[in-house]
Image (cartoon, rainbow, N blue to C red):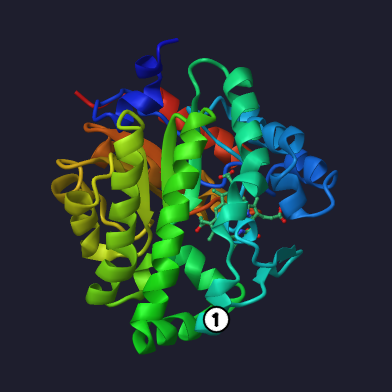
Amino acid sequence: MKSHSKPLLRALSGQTCVPPPIWLMRQAGRYLPEYRETRARGRNFLDVCLTPELAVEITLQPIRRYALDGAIMFSDILIVPHALGQKVWFEDGVGPKLEPLRRAEDLEKLAPAAMAEALAPVYETLRCLRRDLPPEVTLIGFAGAPWTVASYMIEGGTSKDFARAKTWAYREPEVFARLIDLLSEVTADYLCAQVEAGAEALQIFDSWAGIWPEAALRRWCLEPVKAIVARVKSQHPEVPIIVFPRGVGVLYEAFAREVGADALSLDTTVPLDWARAHLQDKVAVQGNLDPLLLVAGGEAQRDAVKAILEALGAGPFVFNLGHGITPQASTDHVADLVAQVRAWRPET
Ligand code: CP3
């Protein structure tokens, strides 16, 4: 199949597809019994991400079950700090942990030169997936945006208020900028290498963009993401890039105008009519079902899916969630969702 006849690539190029293509953020994960089974075969989560045989199998699981339009390679945004030499581990039931960066000297320990070798298994995973995926399915690569990754590197894990990272940025913006610039460069290279290994579309996750006031948001999120998009596009102009600046509210419009992305992934709070009026005339949009509706199911889920399809289905659109699927999601509710999207036609 020619790449432009894949539904997801068509939608990302600005075409309206009826019905729209669908994939789900974090579609491979603990809500799937087969994931839990494969995951138990690795020593730990990072080991699973860096073992191509396991990462390929896990990537394919949601495709086999639901015939989704996009397969997102199985990995994590914290692979990048790991590849830079920072200590990263995942504690069951707690989440990611990192040996935190606390002062300017800690930045000197990061080793970009070691990255290519550390990330080699990711590229092998992508090469295998391009061979094994059904021809109509688009292979999606991804990375975290510099700010979201930096927040974990500084806080040492998930944080409620990002107090250390934000205070550091406000007190020593030049030092903080060195970290953001370093991450921008290595992330652009990483995304280019993913394309060279077979990724056909890319998503940049700025999951914690929404915690900044406007000026800082522009400096630490919008500008670095824009620089990454420009750098990747200069090497691979044909590969569509989706940006997910979660929680940025009306500044979604600045992202649509300024970053040069092909599509924006909308978080759950973005009003549908506003997105149609202010975003969909500039970029393709993706989103934004509340992931908790896949826990609740039933009429609440059905009505919300219909509202999204009716508001955004008449333009360039990719059905997705407003954030990652939760481990409590029901596999039956995901099946209902996919069936409803596949059956949808605009009312005439
Ligand atoms: O979509 C996919 O199937 C691809 C895989 C994927 C994972 N993480 C696997 C994962 C992707 C795209 C990510 C991105 C990611 N990782 C983000 C950005 C998107 C978002 O959700 O905001 C962030 C912030 C992370 C960091 C991270 N990784 C956290 C906070 C956690 C713990 C929370 C949790 O769900 O446990 C992880 C672990 C993680 N990443 C798991 C999976 C499947 C669970 C690990 C396990 O199996 O024990």
Relative to 285, say whether 92 is above or below.
below
Foreground: 154 or 297? 154
Foreground: 66 or 95? 95
Residue carrying label 1: 105
Foreground: 69 or 295? 69
Q: Is residue 52 left or right of residue 167?
A: right
Q: Considering the numbered disc 1 on the image, is that residue within a helix, a strand or a loop?
A: helix
Ligand 1 quarter of the rendering = bottom right
Q: Is residue 186 visible?
A: yes
> In the rendered image, which quarter is residue 232 located in?
top left
Relative to 264, say whether 130 is above or below.
above
The kind of residue on which mark 1 rests is: Glu
Percent x, y of residue 28 = 63, 42
Percent x, y of residue 278 = 15, 50
The residue at the point 37 percent across, 66 percent down is 209
Percent x, y of residue 287 = 37, 45
Quarter of the picture containing the N terminus is: top left
Percent x, y of residue 38 = 79, 40
The residue at the point 57 percent across, 17 percent down is 134
